[in-house]
Each structure stands twice: as C-alpha cells, then as structure tokens.
Image: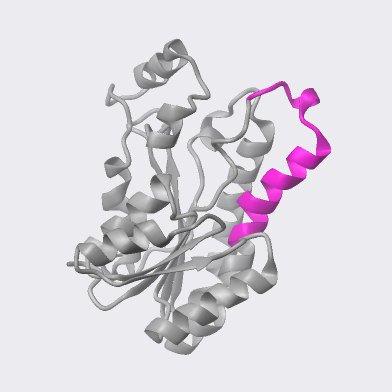
Amino acid sequence: MKLQGKVAIVTGAAQGLGEAYALRFAREGAQVVIADIADGTAVARAIAEQGGEALAVRTDVTDEQSTAEMAAKTVERFGRIDILVNNAAYFSALVKKPFHEIGAAEWDAVVAVNLKGPFLCAKAVFPQMQAQGKGKIINISSGTFFKGLPHFLHYVTTKGGVVGLTRSLAREVGEFGICVNAIAPGYTETEILKEHPQDSEQVRAQIVASRCLRRPEVPEDLMGTIVFLSSDDSDFISGQTIVVDGGSALN
C-alpha cells in the first residue's frame, strides 16, 4: 500500500471523481478526510466498511473559515496532513452556453469554487505541512484548458488558472518540502455525467475519436497518477501538470 500511514484530504469527495479518489486512497492505506459541502458520511462509512479510517467534514471551499476548520479537524482527528487533493469544482451543474450569455453571478460562482477554493484549501493546510517538512498538494485542472472548449469559458478559464496556481505555489513552498502538482483529466464518464450528460452522444463519440487510446475515460484511469503524485515516489516532482486523457491533448 503506497500511502500507508498518510493522511489525505480530498475536497468534493462526497460523489463523483472525489469519491473515487477517496476510496482508492483508503485502499492504499491512507486515512481520508471527505471534505465536501454535501454530506460525505456515506463515503466515510464505505471506507470504514472496507477496514479503513475516514472522517467526513462539511466544507465550503469558498469560505476561509470553513477551510481552516477542515484543516483543524483533520489534525485533531489524525494528527497530521500529508496530502491535499483540490478536487471540488463547479462543473456538472453548468449548462454550456455562448460566453456572452454567461451572467456575472454565474462567472463569479465558478471562479469562487474552481479557483478561490484551491487557494483557500492550500492556505489552510500549509502551516501543518510546513511544520512537518513535507506535503503533497494535487490540484485538479482539466484537459479543456490545453485544447480550448467553446461555450464553457468560465470553466476552462478557471482550470487554466489552476495550472498557474500550481506552478507559482510550487515555487513558493518547495523550500518546505511541499510538492505541488496538477492532474488534467479528459472527459471522464462518472455516474453524475451519465445521469446529467452535458454533451450529446455524437459529441462524446468525437471526444473518444480525438484520443490516441480510443475508448471512454473512466475514473480508474486517473487513479495511478493521483496515487503516484501523493506518494513518496514523486518526492522530486513539483510544479507539473500531467494530462490524463488518453492522448487527446498532446503537449
């Protein structure tokens, strides 16, 4: 188990990819904090039933006090913070539309979750990681940033911002032994997107056709990369963004 003895916070882990990350971390031996504005107790219970340890903490990543409490409760329960996965994002509820039809309030809401959220969460865990002399922060960007995507300007812009945040933060915290990296998934077939598809079958088929590996992307395709970036195996990697999309965006 590559994460034995480590403590991981996963934001937005009550469902979707965040839930998948949390479950995999637990299987790799980590103690996991399910940090979500939604109820994460079901995921924490599932981890406990598999013999792991987990804590569900209601967290609004757009609120500084809430993210500070997330970090404090993690340390109170588990004594340390080794990994932060900034996964929480405003995505599945969005409806694609031309940029000139996006209202200012919607733009601000997307920026608050997708960009301000990772900033506040990193700020919250930094003192503990600094004291430990080591930590891993993994931000979730998107392959859409590398290709551009019409009718999704606010989302793509924030995911580009995540890449910038990753690079700059890596420069700031490297002296404390903290690695900051990002993963840019492609269009991933989660249960949420199956229930609320944002694109037609034709568009999804075009996405698959754009890949070197021509099949749908599933959550398990991301697990090896996120475990690697969270483990000691990646201790000399920082400031990088790894695109995991089957070879659609080639950089």
Colour setup of the view? one colour
**Relative height, residue 43 to residue 90 (above, below):** below
Please tell me which residue is depicted at 28% across the width and 59% down the height of the picture. Answer: 46
Residue 39's x, y, as percent?
Answer: 49, 57
- Give the answer, above or below, for where 24 lies relative to 174: above
Asked where in the image residue 23 lies, by quadrant, the reply is bottom left
Q: Give the range drawn in magenta.
A: 96-118
Residue 144 falls inside the magenta stretch? no
In the rendered image, the vertical position of residue 238 relative to residue 108, given as above or below = below
How far from the left and from the top, in percent, is residue 86?
50, 58
Q: Toward which corner of the image does residue 222 lie, by quadrant?
A: top left
Residue for point 38% across, 69% down: 8
Q: In the displayed orientation, state which residue is furthest to the top.
A: 202
Task: Classify the position of the N terminus by image quarter.
Answer: bottom left
Residue in front for this viewpoint, 91 or 73: 73
Q: Where is residue 119 in the image (x, y as percent from the top left)?
A: 63, 63
Residue sitting at x 75%, y 39%: 106
